[in-house]
Image (cartoon, rainbow, N blue to C red):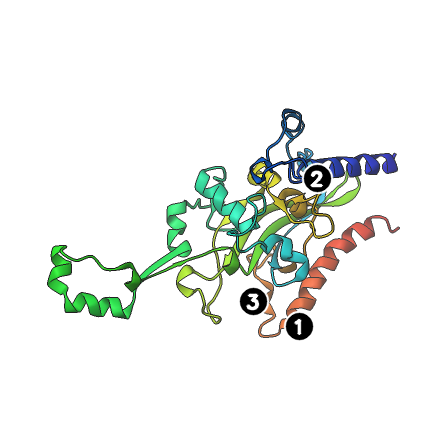
Amino acid sequence: MKFRNLFLGVLVVVGGSSAFSQSNLLNAKTPDEIGKKTAAQMISDNDKPLPYGYVHDRDIMFGKAVWEIIDLDERVNFPLYYPIDTANIGSDRRSLFDVLLKGIKTGKITEVYSDDYFNTKKSLKDMSSSFKYVDTLQTGIDEINNYYEDYKSGRKVLDPQYINVRELSAIDISGYKIKGYWYFDKRQGELKYRLLGICPVAPEARDIGNDKADVIELFWIYFPAIRDVLHEAHAFNDRNSAMPISFDHLLNARRFSAVIYKEENVYGDRKVEDYMKDNAQMQLLESERIKEKIRNFEQDMWNY
């Protein structure tokens, strides 16, 4: 029975992935026809992300919320980072940050918050200072001082060459913080994971180019509310470009490398670095200890 369910699951994943490969690529006579779907393809593509099963509170025997950091410098996490330059690449390939930012700007993503407990909502206007920084160069200030009366009266307008504009883009994202919940479902008898939130991490726009700049949490998004958006966007599959994988599937299947930096605890959910200070090796070992503690609960369920 289990083998049959596994086989059906593989068929669903393979079938869904093949449906999202670049449409009409081999049949197009001109480049304009690439990406155009036939009526039959449009009918077969009207699918939705696989819905989460209902879990009753009484079925949760064990639960633990953890926060992890996904480092985009790691090779296994490259599908979340690239492409960073979209000028010379197809519109069907975008980085995860581009997908999230576009969803916020178009209004498809509304569950955006300033904290990882989803208490305070955040609008695009609230985040504008983090995304874009406009400053006048010193030469521009000198220009204004030399012709102060002309600029004051409006007879002259400052030339754009004297203005420095910095905009945050996908290349500046250093990682993602995620919040998830590990729980043991006693009805199904297995340990499961549910992703709750995701947050891009990057320096502010004013600090772009400064290697010593601190990174900040740009915004937190409640993950279950954006699954439809992530299901329509696809990450590059290095093994088979004809079968890309959706960001929703990639994240839910945990096809990434992450390190736990915080767990819910009696100390106000303090971070690992708060009690393992100035020792990166001990912080990594503590992260592994938390991970093993969660795993061991499932293992201990079958030991007598």
For label 1, the residue is 281
Mark 3: few/some/many CA within 10 Å (<14, 14-19, 20+): few
Q: Nearer the viewer, residue 302 or 141?
A: 141
Mark 1: few/some/many CA within 10 Å (<14, 14-19, 20+): few
Q: Quadrant of residue 154?
A: bottom left
For label 3, the residue is 274
Disc number at residue 17?
2
Question: Residue drawn 73% across and 48% down?
Answer: 240
Residue 127 appears in view: yes
Disc number at residue 173?
none
Question: Residue drawn 55% across and 37% down?
Answer: 32
Gap in Å between the C-alphas at discs 1 and 2?
Answer: 39 Å
Gap in Å between the C-alphas at discs 3 and 2?
Answer: 42 Å
Q: Earlier in the sequence, mark 1 or mark 2?
A: 2
Q: Element type at marker 1?
A: helix
Question: Residue drawn 78% across and 37% down?
Answer: 9
Residues under numbered marks 3 and 1 in contact, where contact means CB atoms less than 8 Å apart: no
Q: Position of residue 250 (x, y in %)?
A: 67, 47
Q: Give the mark count.
A: 3
Residue 117 appears in view: no
